[in-house]
Image: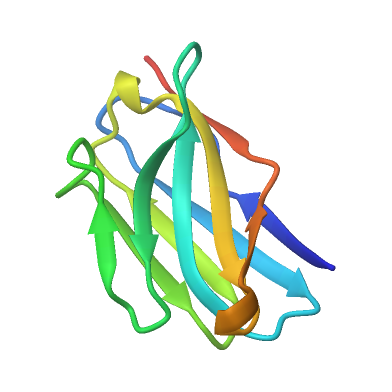
Amino acid sequence: QVQLEESGGGLVQPGGSLRLSCAASGSIFSINDMDWYRQAPGKERELVAGISSGGRTNYADSVKGRFTISRDNAKNMVYLQMNSLKPEDTAVYFCNARIGPMSRLVSYWGKGMLVTVSS
């Protein structure tokens, strides 16, 4: 079994910063892509940022220039540095990772954690 555990969420004022972390543990063969998603109240879950095993990144237009995704392959971790936070960034943030051999990748999700941007 594989578990993903997020940390670093909480309450922050507009313009502030937070760093989210996600640690993968368990029976890990190989981690492919790792992503951060978020879901705001009444909205669908959306991709925020993704990073491949080789370090290639992609971002939602709404966070480009403000958020930075990174990973530490040795520690099986992915991070999301969030700067210049806005109230509309308020959401539950989820970590996702595709794990396994390329022929049998399985998608795993963390439980999610709340990020609230408010004064």
- Residue 67, given in percent of the width and then of the height, sits at 27, 50
Name the one closer to the observer, 37 or 14. Answer: 37
Residue found at x 49% / y 11% = 42
- 74 left or right, relative to 24: left
Residue at the (56%, 71%) spot, across then down: 77
State whether residue 44 is above or below residue 104: above
Seen in the picture, residue 73 relative to 5 is either above or below; the reply is below
Q: Quadrant of residue 117?
A: top left
Which residue occupies 46% across, 50% down? 36
What's the coloring here? rainbow
**Looking at the rendering, in which quadrant would you find the C terminus?**
top left
Which residue does the image show at 39% across and 17% down from the upper left?
118
Question: Which sits in the foreground, 92 or 99?
Answer: 99
Left/right placement of residue 73 relative to residue 18 reads right
- Residue lying furthest right: 1
> For residue 85, what is the image quadrant?
top left
